[in-house]
Image (cartoon, helix red, strand yellow):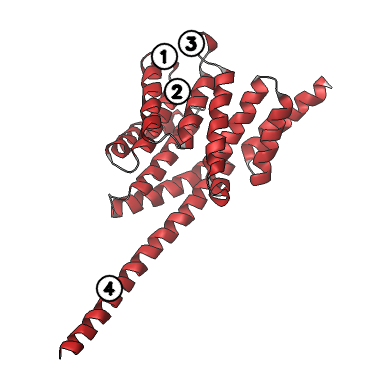
Amino acid sequence: MKNLIQFFTVVFTILTCSALIAQIRPVNDRLTEVKLLTRQAYIRYDKNMLLKAFDIFQNIHKADTSDYEALYNLTLIEYKLLEMGIRPGSEELFGQYYESALKNAEELCEGEIFTAEGKTLSAAIYMMKIASSPMSAITLSFKIHSLLDEAEKIKPEFPRIYLIRGMMNYNTPVMFGGSYEDALKNFNKSVSLYERQNEDTARSDWDYLEALTWTGRSQEKLENFEAALFSYKKVLRIEPDFMWVKNSLLPNLEEKLKIND
């Protein structure tokens, strides 16, 4: 009788574990699929694809509010939607997602796993606020740099910290402390950190493409045109259909080089 009880206990344990694995796998598969969708949305700069990815991440997080990875990804998408919302005629998009993005980033900051990511995203969201309303730089610039410094202390190997800091350096007027040289240093550090990761991980991460692209833009501003060309072509070797580089940055630079010859 004792052996029979032990047998059923083992069977029950196996069945329970199998059921749990079956539940986990679809969620993990879904996360992988929606991350790929987000990457494609970024490559194409497609608002509708981003919104679709946002809805999926939001549903995953609603089903499990402890899923901070889903919260991080949906907040990252909100940040990109804010970027789209600073374009003329898209202001409504900015207004729709700004408060929600900040709230989600703050929630990440309060957790234990994605604290550095939350602080970096908070800084990025405030940066978009400055782009939307330049006068807000008076109150937000110091806050942005403080958040990035805090994130760096927590997780110094997180590449997006240096990407956002570089973007601040790049977009801030020189008279207020901006510098293309400092921007380039930060973008180079971001790229280097991405490239220290597993190669497949780095190549599939759209943040890596963004860091490479901003590296090229900084090189171009510094009139290091061959270096800029190298960066843009490197982006297209990884992702041949990256619209920003393929249709705008690279053709414009090649035209500039042709004129200068």
**x, y percent for residue 170:** 55, 21
Question: Visible in this render: residue 21?
Answer: yes
Q: Which residue is mark 4?
A: 16
Query: Which one is nearer the viewer's eye here, 55 or 259?
Result: 259
- Position of 258 with respect to 141 (left or right) is right
Between marks 3 and 2, how big is the CA–CA gap?
Answer: 18 Å
Name the residue located 67 percent from the left edge and 39 percent from the top edge.
234
Spot the residue most to the right. 261
Q: Which residue is mark 2?
A: 132
What kind of element bears circle 1?
helix
Query: Sequence-wise, which precedes: disc 3 or disc 2?
Result: 2
Name the residue located 41 percent from the left edge and 59 percent from the top edge.
28
Residue type pointed to by label 4? Thr
Can you tell which of label 1 and label 4 is closer to the viewer? 4
Query: Sequence-wise, which precedes: disc 4 or disc 3?
Result: 4
Tell me the number on the disc at residue 176: 3
- Disc 4: CA contacts within 10 A as few (<14), some (14-19) or many (>=20): few
- Position of 117 with respect to 215 (left or right) is left
Residue 184 against residue 103 in the figure, above or below? above
Query: Sequence-wise, which precedes: disc 1 or disc 3?
Result: 1
